[in-house]
Amino acid sequence: MASKQLGERAPGSRRMFGAPVRALALAGWALLPLRLFLGATFTYAGLQKFANPDFLNQNSPTSIKAQLVAASRTSPIHAVLVHLIALATPIGFLIAFAELAIGVGTLLGLWPRVAAIGGATLSFTLFLTISFHASPFYTGADIVFTFAWMPLVLAGSSMRPSLEGVIAARAASTTSSATSELVAIPFAQVQRLCGHYARGRCAARNGEPCDAGRCPVLLGEPADPVERPRDALERRTFVLRTASGALVAVGVGVAAAVAAVVGRFAGGATIPVAPPELGGTSSAPAPTSATPSALGTLLGPARVVPVGGAAAFTIPVTGDPGIVVRPSAAQFDAYDAVCPHAGCTVAYLAQNHVLACPCHGSQFLVSTGEVISGPAPHGLMKLNVAEGPDGNLYLK
Ligand code: FES
């Protein structure tokens, strides 16, 4: 064989952990359920991002930009992330396209090891940015996805059924070469077929004891090496894989465009644009008549918060983002907007009247901050915010 398969041992190498020759390469069928799940999940995730108008909308509190801003506060790679915020839109596009390409490549079994390495890399990057502070750690899906990709990285092109298998068979037939397909057969059958086995010994290895770990047949090194037209086969295989990859890339591009159009026509924007900010760039004049020490810490004019809407502010002591929702003219429900799952910033969804996290979908009651759904281990931290007699909001 021109190149060694994963799981092979060089002649003379010692057995380790008892794994049979080509054990990993022969695991293709066993990995089929995992492969289908990962492929379908990444395909769905990519299409969903293209179909969601808010994902690339820089003004949306659930956009990739909002997620990067939130992650840049808490991520262990925050020094890198702060420089990427300005590139949020192209990065979001790249993530969506990569997820779609990885998913489709995995489902089809085309360049499967490249797709699996891409999936593991993307998952690990998302772990470092979005899920690093998930608590307990196993509630963050990205670390689980990172390790779920590993068996597919190891198995590589041996996964079946796959386009790679079809290409290998076609290349072998058009170049009249022996197929490089790997098959699993009992070792006793190898002993019967190899022609070198006799009473527990191997004639091809000078009468040494027969050993599956050193079998010249399994290691792809026949006792009588025959020159085979491997170059033509490998060239043909490469051309077919590249052509198939280009076709799939075009298909992925078309699917992304269709998802984007359908998403905008069918759903429209589901999330309001970024809420107004208390004490931020609001045009409201600064209050003058209040006594902050008596009423609490001044946040800004209450009229900045629309009835039925929300406004953002920065919590003075902690520097955390805060959010205040105004269900009715006289009611203000305020929270530390840091999601207790992994530290993203929650946003107010007016149509559902909930506070929602853009990263992993946790939802919280507006009235109490309690968790409604999602991986957040507990509710949001409620803040005591009230309107003063001067029409300003104060944090007590
Ligand atoms: S950070 Fe994961 S749900 Fe909020």
Image (tube, rainbow, N blue to C red):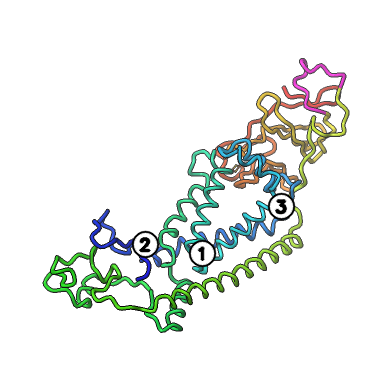
Question: What is the magenta range?
Answer: 288-300
Ligand 1 lies under 8 Å from the Cβ of mark 2: no
Label 2 neighbour load within 10 Å: few <14, some 14-19, many 20+: some
Given residues 190 and 177, the one toward you in this image is 177
Q: Which residue is mark 2?
A: 6
Q: Quadrant of residue 132?
A: top right
| Of the two numbered discs 2 and 1 in the rendering, the one whose residue sits closer to the viewer | 2
Q: Which residue is mark 3?
A: 56
Side (left or right) of 146 relative to 322 = left
Is 132 colored magenta in this rendering? no
The amino acid on which the numbered mark 3 sits, given as a three-letter code, is Leu
| Of the two numbered discs 2 and 3 in the rendering, the one whose residue sits closer to the viewer | 2
> Which residue is the extreme one toward the left?
199
Q: Which residue is mark 1?
A: 106
Labelled pair 1, 3 in contact (Cβ < 8 Å) = no
The amino acid on which the numbered mark 2 sits, given as a three-letter code, is Leu
Mark sitting earlier along the chain (1/3): 3
Label 1 neighbour load within 10 Å: few <14, some 14-19, many 20+: many
Q: Position of residue 200 (x, y in %)?
A: 13, 69
The secondary element bearing badge 1 is classed as helix
Residue at 61% x, 44% y is 362
Given residues 328 and 124, the one toward you in this image is 124
Labelled pair 2, 3 in contact (Cβ < 8 Å) = no
The secondary element bearing badge 2 is classed as loop
Residue at 85% x, 22% y is 389
Q: CA distance from mark 2 to mark 3?
A: 40 Å
Split into quadrants, the picture shows ligand 1 in the one at top right
Q: Position of residue 49 (x, y in %)?
A: 66, 56
